[in-house]
Amino acid sequence: MRSNNPYHRGAGLYELNLALPVISTIRRQEAAAVGKLIARYGDRRHRALEVGPGTGMYTLALAQAFGEVVAVEDSATMAGILGRRLAAAGATNVTVVNDDFMRLPVDGAFDVAVAIGVLDYVAEPAAFVARMCAATREALIITAPQRGLLGACFAAAARLRGIRVYRHHRSAPAAWAPGWRCHVAEVGLHTRLTRGLTLVAALEPRSTS
């Protein structure tokens, strides 16, 4: 997976970034939407895949909702932080895999797959989402930056640091997973005048009852 995620080079920077007031507000709104989806699909009999868990913002919630979680993180530094946090929390049902998700044999191995904040930095989103869809039997939960004023500001701030952020139209998640049902919500300072910064999408195979 080709990604230019800047936090792979500095996990500490990631933690500081999340603490910034505006980012913290946006993340709380995102977390509320994602948390509802985790609760909807959560089942202690099921296995969940989390791609790009970072330092674990959603991993513990997944560990509580599912019987088993596999967290695939390609940054060794972040995987180390995540592993220590899970150990401290006593989350024994999570396996942290430090590898590139796109190289792993995961087809049909999971009931639910989750990727939060990953598509911000992925140049080929359709290929990534197709791989995620292949991994899951019941549902896929993803987020992506939306085109619009807030998305443009986010991308401009990233460019100042030499980082490219990929922004998408609201219709993009459905296009990435043809044949899947798709529900998209806008979060992150969404008002009547501005689109939300983040798209939170839940996708289900058409065959799912």
Image (cartoon, rainbow, N blue to C red):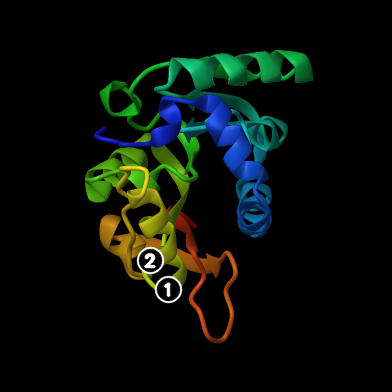
Foreground residue among 42 and 155: 155
Q: Residue at x 52, y 69 (%)?
A: 186
Q: Which residue is mark 2?
A: 152
Q: Could you say which disc has been placed on residue 74 in the image?
A: none
Horizontal placement of 187 versus 179: left or right?
A: right
Dividing the image into 4 quarters, which one contains the N terminus?
A: top left
- Residue 58 visible to an observer of this rendering: no
Residue 163 location, x and y as percent? 32, 43
**Kind of residue at disc 2:** Ala
**Kind of residue at disc 1:** Leu
Real-space Cα distance between discs 1 and 2? Answer: 5 Å
Query: Label 2: few (<14), some or many (≥20) within 10 Å?
Result: some
Check the image and name the residue furthest to the right.
89
Check the image and name the residue furthest to the front.
160
Horizontal placement of 10 versus 179: left or right?
A: right
Foreground residue among 174 and 139: 174
Note whether 121 is above or below 54 in the view shown: below
The answer to which image quadrant residue 3 occupies is: top left
Q: Residue at x 24, y 45 (%)?
A: 123
Residue 93 location, x and y as percent? 65, 19
Residue 64 location, x and y as percent? 72, 33
Q: Residue at x 64, y 35 (%)?
A: 62
The answer to which image quadrant residue 45 occupies is: top right
- Residue 168 visible to an observer of this rendering: yes
Where disc 2 sits, the SS reads helix
Q: Which residue is mark 1?
A: 149
Query: Label 1: few (<14), some or many (≥20) within 10 Å?
Result: some
Residue 114 location, x and y as percent? 49, 41
Q: Are marks 1 and 2 in contact (CB under 8 Å)?
A: yes
Where disc 1 sits, the SS reads helix
